[in-house]
Amino acid sequence: MEKEIKGEESLTDKDMAIVFFGELSTKGKNIFDFIRLLGKNIKTHLKAYPQLGYEIHKDHIYIVLNGVPYDQVAKVLPLIPGIHAFAKVKAVAKDFDRIASESIALAKASKAKTFKVFAKRADKTFPMHSDDINRQIGALVLQNVPGIKVDVHEPELQVHIYIRPECAYVYGPKEAGMGGYPLGIAGKVLTLLSGGIDSPVAAYLMMKRGCRIEAIHFAAPPYTSDKVLTKITDLLHVLNTYQPEIKLYVVPFTKLQEEIYEKAGTSYAITIMRRMMLRIAQKVAHAGNDLVISTGESIGQVASQTLKSMSAIDKACDMTVIRPLATYDKTEIIALAQRLGTFDISIRPYDDCCTVFPVKDPVTAPHLDEVEKIEGTFDWNTLVNECVDNVKKIWIKPLPASTNLI
Ligand code: ATP
Ligand code: MG
């Protein structure tokens, strides 16, 4: 497939990283689009290292290090959606002695007490079968690495030998990637970002699944302070780790929100507010070519997130609304938020537009005819269009590495 190797063409004796795709192998004809996009995304994430070379194959991507320390590359690879695992690999000539010496060096450097050899032969012209390679290399490792033993069930070190037409690859342990699909392969999604704990986690899960995100935030100044916007921006800077450029839409929501609270009284205000958010989001999504909307809602978390509430809310828009956290417990969401680094930003105490308009008795099973009756008492359509017409667009790009967001 695609080749972009810096310097001399031969891979022999080069230090490289090998990238595995996992789930992509089930993607049939689309597999080439997947791999090409993943290759492009890897190059974007590693653009600080222009000396790296890339070789993109049907079932692996090789990154030729050309002097870049493997550890630098290994820090970046777990942040790229679509990479399931990766490993440090040495490319050697398809020569048994050379493969053996590299396998011995790997076992010595690992300091493992037990090992097992896993040979795979994509080049069927290589004169030995995989089983013979396993046995003979295994014997040489035993002879040359003092104290090491074979363990076929739970080896501390897996010595992988992959023989391909161009050369043989020798590699040890695989490191876990973040999984999922290459960013952008699924299309673009408009994600509702409130500044709370849940919505940035939901946005991350959408990106992990291959969706490029755009974010929309509903702001209600002067009830909400500018600090909420700083919080939203900082959350998106964390998400820049996975998607280097994110478009943020800020909706001036105050007038519509005041009108909702005046007309809806208490119990239906949140239901109607959420319906208005979806109506606005849908218009923004259509204009921005976003295919679906996503939110941080979770079944039963609050009154507006019961199945009956979410059904009544969804009826306000035709677009598919995906709720990646629907089945998550709050403790699971918090654990993921902490791992991602969004938690400490989310818990900053600034109010967003939902908390400054508190509701004492929100309905958990809203009736659609009641919702429609209330919505019939004011000209929400004009107010929704005003919100859409006055949306502010901001591009959020990575901060310098030294910036501390917390
Ligand atoms: P989070 O759910 O992010 O922790 P929260 O709990 O304050 O924040 P909820 O009341 O649970 O928010 O709102 C449910 C979802 O609705 C949010 O996850 C988010 O997707 C969306 N949402 C709520 N308020 C806003 C807002 N001001 N701007 C954009 N989206 C919002
Ligand atoms: Mg929530």
Image: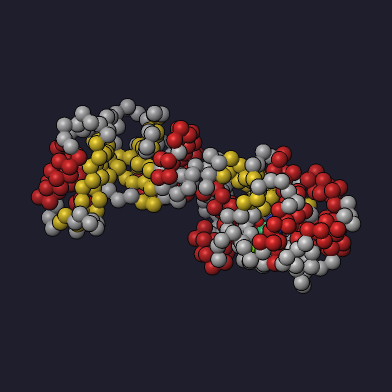
The x and y percentages for residue 287 are 72, 39
The x and y percentages for residue 375 are 84, 56
Is residue 26 visible in this depiction of the protein?
yes
Q: Nearer the viewer, residue 131 or 12?
A: 131
Ligand 1 lies in quarter = bottom right
Give the tally of numbered discs.
0
Quarter of the rendering occupied by the N terminus: top left
Q: Residue at x 81, y 49 (%)?
A: 384
Quarter-wise, where is residue 265 in the image? bottom right
The x and y percentages for residue 150 are 16, 54
Q: Residue at x 47, y 37 (%)?
A: 34
Q: Nearer the viewer, residue 49 or 34?
A: 34
Q: Nearer the viewer, residue 179 or 8?
A: 179
Q: Would residue 71 be found to the left or right of residue 395 on screen? A: left
Q: Would residue 59 be found to the left or right of residue 267 on screen? A: left
Q: Would residue 176 be found to the left or right of residue 362 on screen? A: left
Relative vertical location of residue 307 with respect to residue 233 in this rendering, above or below: below
Q: Nearer the viewer, residue 23 or 203?
A: 23
Is residue 246 visible in this depiction of the protein?
no
Quarter of the rendering occupied by the C terminus: bottom right
Outermost residue to the left: 143
Outermost residue to the bottom: 360
Quarter-wise, where is residue 196 in the image? bottom right
Q: Residue at x 69, y 43 (%)?
A: 285
The x and y percentages for residue 395 are 65, 44
Q: Residue at x 71, y 61 (%)?
A: 309
Q: Would residue 304 be found to the left or right of residue 118 on screen? A: right
Q: How is the image coloured?
A: secondary structure
